[in-house]
Image (cartoon, helix red, strand yellow):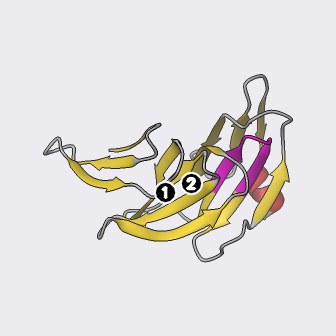
Amino acid sequence: MLVGNNNNTAHLWSIKGGKVKYSFTSHSDSVNTVGFFDTKKCFTGSSDSTLKLWDLNKGNLAVTFLCGTKCFSSATDGHLIYTGHNNGYIKFWSENKKTPVVEKKIHSGSISHLILSSDNNSLVVSDLQDIDIERYRDQYL
């Protein structure tokens, strides 16, 4: 289980042992969103305006992406990480590229939730007032 919190850290917990396996501590502000990229990597997004990809085998930082704005929400399909930001933008990130593959303003407020459909073709994007369901992934790639 992966948990982020407002003390600038995220923790990977062992469900079997009930103990923290790794603590990810390189953020300088609250960790707002977390997820598993694949079986070997997880990611954390923070109010420090970074998205970080972590190696689950070693417990160390693999890549830091500079988002430019606070990262509030995320989703992944195992190929890209989708992030929602406090300025109404969504960004699509590839683990092999330091800048977003896609960067698009969707809302006037903060993007509070991103949910990828089970077929990975539609992305539900919401701020605190509106919800959009569109084929953002197909539309922008």
Q: Quadrant of the C terminus?
A: bottom right
Magenta segment: 82-91
Name above or below for residue 130 compared with residue 6: above
Mark toward the start of the polypeptide (2 vs 1): 1
Marks 2 and 1 close (CB-CB < 8 Å) = yes
Q: Nearer the viewer, residue 24 or 117?
A: 24
- Residue 66 seen by the camera: yes
Name above or below for residue 11 compared with residue 61: above
| Helix, strand or loop at mark 2 | strand
Name above or below for residue 135 compared with residue 52: above
Q: Which of 17 and 61 is in front in this view?
A: 61
Q: Nearer the viewer, mark 2 or mark 1?
A: 1
Under mark 1, the amino acid is Phe
Crowding at mark 1 (Cα within 10 Å: few <14, some 14-19, many 20+): many
Crowding at mark 2 (Cα within 10 Å: few <14, some 14-19, many 20+): many
* Residue position for label 1: 43
